[in-house]
Amino acid sequence: MLSGPGLFGGLFELKGYNNPVLVSSMDGVGTKLKLAVTMDSYDSVGIDIVNHSVNDILTCGAAPIFFLDYIAMGQLLTEKVCDIVKGLSSACQEVGCALIGGETAEMPGLYVGTDFDLVGTIIGIVEKNNIINGRDIASGDIILGLPSSGLHTNGYSLARHVLGESRQSLDTFHPMLGQTLGQALLTPHRCYLKELKPLLHLVKGLAHITGGGFPGNVPRVMPANVTAHFNTSAWDIPPIFKLIQECGQITTDEMYRVFNMGIGMVIIAAPENAQELLRCLPDAKQIGNIIPLQANQQVILS
């Protein structure tokens, strides 16, 4: 960073790149914020938005260089803003990303009571010849999965409806979770940058499993002539998803459409590279394979 606080724009100097391509992404934490308000716990959502954003640009092969945040409240509560920024800054430090600036807005009448919003914009960089675009994905390639830390930042509207969002509900200890419901639901979004960055040369495609689950995200990184076939028995579904499904009597198809179901990042690689990835990523599992297009479906879960 070249700018200190007070300027109207953030400045960042790029060095050491031959043919750099900037990669950007913008997202929010969503209704997970409602649980943060109820639990009076705000630093985790700052971590959420940074890690979510880092994972998004990582799918292109990009590493983050700087991040900007937007925080809006009906009444500006300094202590809460400080907790949010604490989470933002710690997550940025963890991935070597500059928290270059942002906007904090007080808007009474638009945000009521303790409601607030948190949005982030990330800028990353990748050498042009190192961009991951999935164009070379072909039948016979292997699909690996890296575990999620929970719901991450998606599916909370359904989870809140099914499990409840009162302080009493969130403070309830669930033996199957080994913790309270609130602790499980506020677990921060996992970041995959550090473990994947040195291995990106082995990867053909990466899909960050966010809103839309497997069907909504995996086709975004694949050519149109193949299908990703997932073996859903290849990994253990975390208890939080089983609890949601049981309490809400939700179909399995709907669960995989809304939630990540325990897989936060999908990796697609050639068979010879998949073995090296499995060796270097201890918690990765082979969860499927790429086959010729089947019945015009780009994702099959079985």
Image (cartoon, rainbow, N blue to C red):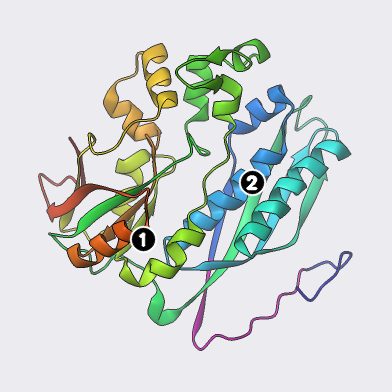
Going from N to C along the chain, the mark reached first, 1 or 2, is 2
* Residue topped by disc 1: 280
**Who's the residue at 60% across and 44% down the image?**
48
Q: Is residue 266 visible?
A: yes
Q: Decide which of 216, 187 is in the foreground and name it.
A: 187
**Who's the residue at 64% across and 65% down the image?**
96
- Quadrant containing the C terminus in the rendered view: top left
What amino acid type is highlighted by mark number 2? Ile
15 falls in the magenta region: yes
- Quadrant containing the N terminus in the rendered view: bottom right
| Above or below 127: residue 88 | above
Question: CA separation, marks 1 and 2?
Answer: 25 Å
Q: Does 167 sit left or right of 26 as displayed? A: right
Span shown in magenta: 10-23
Q: Does 165 sit left or right of 56 as displayed? A: right
x and y percent of residue 197 in the render?
A: 46, 66
Label of residue 47 in the image: 2
Mark 1 Cα-neighbour bin, 10 Å: few <14, some 14–19, many ≥20 = some
x and y percent of residue 106 in the render?
A: 83, 40
Q: Decide which of 198, 231 is in the foreground and name it.
A: 198
Mark 2 Cα-neighbour bin, 10 Å: few <14, some 14–19, many ≥20 = many
Q: Where on the picture, by quarter, is residue 241?
A: top left
What amino acid type is highlighted by mark number 1? Cys
Query: Tag 1's secondary structure?
Result: helix
